[in-house]
Amino acid sequence: MHLLVTRPEPDGERTAAKLRARGCEVMLAPLLRIENIAADLGGEWHAVAVTGVNALRAIADNPALKTLLASPAYAVGGRTADAALAQGFENVISAGGDVSDLARVMKTHLRAGARVLYLAGDDRSGDLAGDLAAAGVDVTTRVVYRAVALATFPSDVGEALTVGWLEGVLHFSRRSAATYLDCAAVAGITESALAPVHYCLSQQVAQPLEAAGARAVRVATAPNEAALIGLIIG
């Protein structure tokens, strides 16, 4: 099967390697580039909230990290939780789902008045701070990375879409799916770009593709890489 992985690096290469190991031919075209943002993370926190591995990578050299490691870390899912443990957090709680699941878990663990540091990207899904504020939990959001979108497809990707070589495209975020559509429009190949099967991490990721007219959209049963690959490999 011929597939396109649009995930940012270094995660895109890991996903591509797993697909190649299962006999797929894979093109890798990260449509978003991750840039770290320096942020002041000082303060007294009862907990840290993380909704993606990129946020943990972004604070690896932050002078406040050593202090933060003493706080419980609430992670959106298993992979983010594993990354938090690897970084040195000892008390890590995984919500095993999406941002709504994370808010639900944190509400059961934290009392009103708790102060939470949310390590976030500049483009966020859900409203973790708003959800927790309703329970009296004070969330301070610090943006520690941004995702910069490509303006055009790499030339080989545009050609592969034009000639119909690609049978499937993997989308890991709503932003990357929207960028995929933008790049297709710039290249004048929207119809060709919509033709493959689009494998999406969640229904939210799938929405821009469905709205654009993609007829073959598949949504993972859980918002993680294993479930997404399972759609393809079975």
Image (spheres, helix red, strand yellow):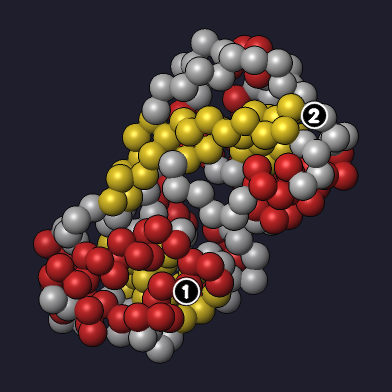
**Quadrant in the picture for residue 171:** bottom left
**Which label sits on residue 43?**
none
Residue topped by disc 1: 207
Q: Position of residue 51 (x, y in %)?
A: 59, 44
For label 2, the crowd category at 10 Å Cα-Cα, with few meaning under 14, some 14 to 19 and many 20 or more, is: some
- Which residue is found at the position 44% from the left and 62% from the top? 174
- Which residue is found at the position 31% from the left and 81% from the top? 194
- For the residue pair 200 and 39, the one nearer the viewer reads as 39
Q: Secondary structure at mark 1?
A: helix
User: Would you say 211 lies left or right of 65 here?
Assistant: left
Task: Inspect the image, locate mark 1, and give the three-letter code of the amino acid beneath it.
Answer: Gln
User: Is residue 206 in sight in this rendering?
Assistant: yes
Q: Secondary structure at mark 2?
A: loop
Q: Position of residue 188 (x, y in %)?
A: 13, 76
Q: Quadrant of the C terminus?
A: bottom right
Q: Position of residue 202 (x, y in %)?
A: 56, 67
**Which label sits on residue 114?**
2
